[in-house]
């Protein structure tokens, strides 16, 4: 809000803000399309992997299942790590700290380049589909910010559209607004929550906030959620003919399907759990900082940066496939469909899936016994 900026703003067409609203809509729309493509690529590769592993486990071929899972996941991690290490190091990690640093006034080179966006997209898809304990939510924030930076100025690091709209938004404040909108739209698309995206931008990433810009950012968030829900609806319509139907399976993330009765006495264990979780969080943060510093100091050679995630996925796949074997079998009388992996259980069976319906059951040698 300097005097120079106030003099410059007097020359701008204040009564014609439709173009900024339009760019905000396009930022949200493109972010929603990118999110839809990302989730479909992840879902396709993960479905192929888990369907094959489920089939092999169902036929008692545990070593073959482990070998396939390790090889396929390792190849996906390799394809995720190579472009990041050798083409676009700015695409490493979630990208959220870099976006927050930029919006708080730090110069962060190359984080909004088109090359960074493309590498981020494919690297995130391969990494999440591999089975690593990581999700696309953080990268969606970075990709949304990249989209906001690119569409607001019509440029990458080397190309400029040169049009009047690009000149109108060719200042740092407008770029900051569109980057904030892109980051908020990324959260909204990842969690199907436009209000959540707005609150994330307001509370976490933005240091400069104006009320009228807040409405524009919320508009971008709604455009992103509408885009991904419409594309999901159209995708389902090809097989079932229900275009325009927003099913909760697609449009609601983390849907609660089971209600639990509460009691006043539950406050005591709740407090204890809160204290324990807080203590564990402190220890986790402490360990995470020391591990990150150790990695920065010792893993500097590029080939080791590629091998590190491959070793992690091999360890993770091996542990997840070996640990269930050490647990005893449970007599249930259920049968598991080899294609969908869903159990069909008689009344009174002890198998219950509270958190994830897609969790797989390890079969024992005898029929009706499951881990």
Image (cartoon, rainbow, N blue to C red):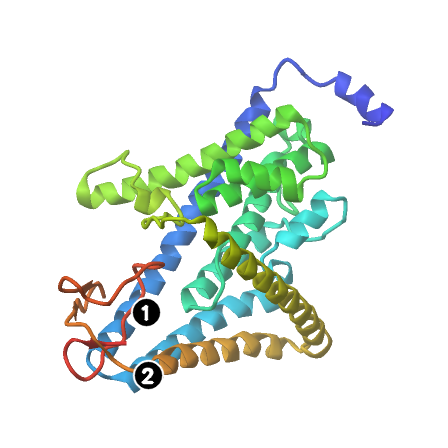
Local SS, label 1: helix
Residue sitting nearer the eye, 244 or 283: 283
Rendered position, 29 above or below 120 = above
- Residue 285 sits in which quadrant? bottom right
Q: Which residue lies under the disc numbered 2?
A: 325
Rendered position, 206 above or below 321 = above
Q: Residue at x 52, y 50 (%)?
A: 140
Q: Which residue lies under the disc numbered 1?
A: 49
Is 16 on the left-hand or right-hand side of 233?
Answer: right
> Alpha-carbon neighbours of circle 1 within 10 Å: few (<14), some, or many (≥20)?
some
Mark linked to residue 86: none
- Residue 129 sits in which quadrant? bottom left
Residue sitting nearer the eye, 138 or 121: 138
Q: Residue at x 46, y 76 (%)?
A: 316
Q: Residue at x 64, y 13 (%)?
A: 15
Between marks 1 and 2, how big is the CA–CA gap? 20 Å
- Residue 174 sits in which quadrant? top right
């Amino acid at each position: 809000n300097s005097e120079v900026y106030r003099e410059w703003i007097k020359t701008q067409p204040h009564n014609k803000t439709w173009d900024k609203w339009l760019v905000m809509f396009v930022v949200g729309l493109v972010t929603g399309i990118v999110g839809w493509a990302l989730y479909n690529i992840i879902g396709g590769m993960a479905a192929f992997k888990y369907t094959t592993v489920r089939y092999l486990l169902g036929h008692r071929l545990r070593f073959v299942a482990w070998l396939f899972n390790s090889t396929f996941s390792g190849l996906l991690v390799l394809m995720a790590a190579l472009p990041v290490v050798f083409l676009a190091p700015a695409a490493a990690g979630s990208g959220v700290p870099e976006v927050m640093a930029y919006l708080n006034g730090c110069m962060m080179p190359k984080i909004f380049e088109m090359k960074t966006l493309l590498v981020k997209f494919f690297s995130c898809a391969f990494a999440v589909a591999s089975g690593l304990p990581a999700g696309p939510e953080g990268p969606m924030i970075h990709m949304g910010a990249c989209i906001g930076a690119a569409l607001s100025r019509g440029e990458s690091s080397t190309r400029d559209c040169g049009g009047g709209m690009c000149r109108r938004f060719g200042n740092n404040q407008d770029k900051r607004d569109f980057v904030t909108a892109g980051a908020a739209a990324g959260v909204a698309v990842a969690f199907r929550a436009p209000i959540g995206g707005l609150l994330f931008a307001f509370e976490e990433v933005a240091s400069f906030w104006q009320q009228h810009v807040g409405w524009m950012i919320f508009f971008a968030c709604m455009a992103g959620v509408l885009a991904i829900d419409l594309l999901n609806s159209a995708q389902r319509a090809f097989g079932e003919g229900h275009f325009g139907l927003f099913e909760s399976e697609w449009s609601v993330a983390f849907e609660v399907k089971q209600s639990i009765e509460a009691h006043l006495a539950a406050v005591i264990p709740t407090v204890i759990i809160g204290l324990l979780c807080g203590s564990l969080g402190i220890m986790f943060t402490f360990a995470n900082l020391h591990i990150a510093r150790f990695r920065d100091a010792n893993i500097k050679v590029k080939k080791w940066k590629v091998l590190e995630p491959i070793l992690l996925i091999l360890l993770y796949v091996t542990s997840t496939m070996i640990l269930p074997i050490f647990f005893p079998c449970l007599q249930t009388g259920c049968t598991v469909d080899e294609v969908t992996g869903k159990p069909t259980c008689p009344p009174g069976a002890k198998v219950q899936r509270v958190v994830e319906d897609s969790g797989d059951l390890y079969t024992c040698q005898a029929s009706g016994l499951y881990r």
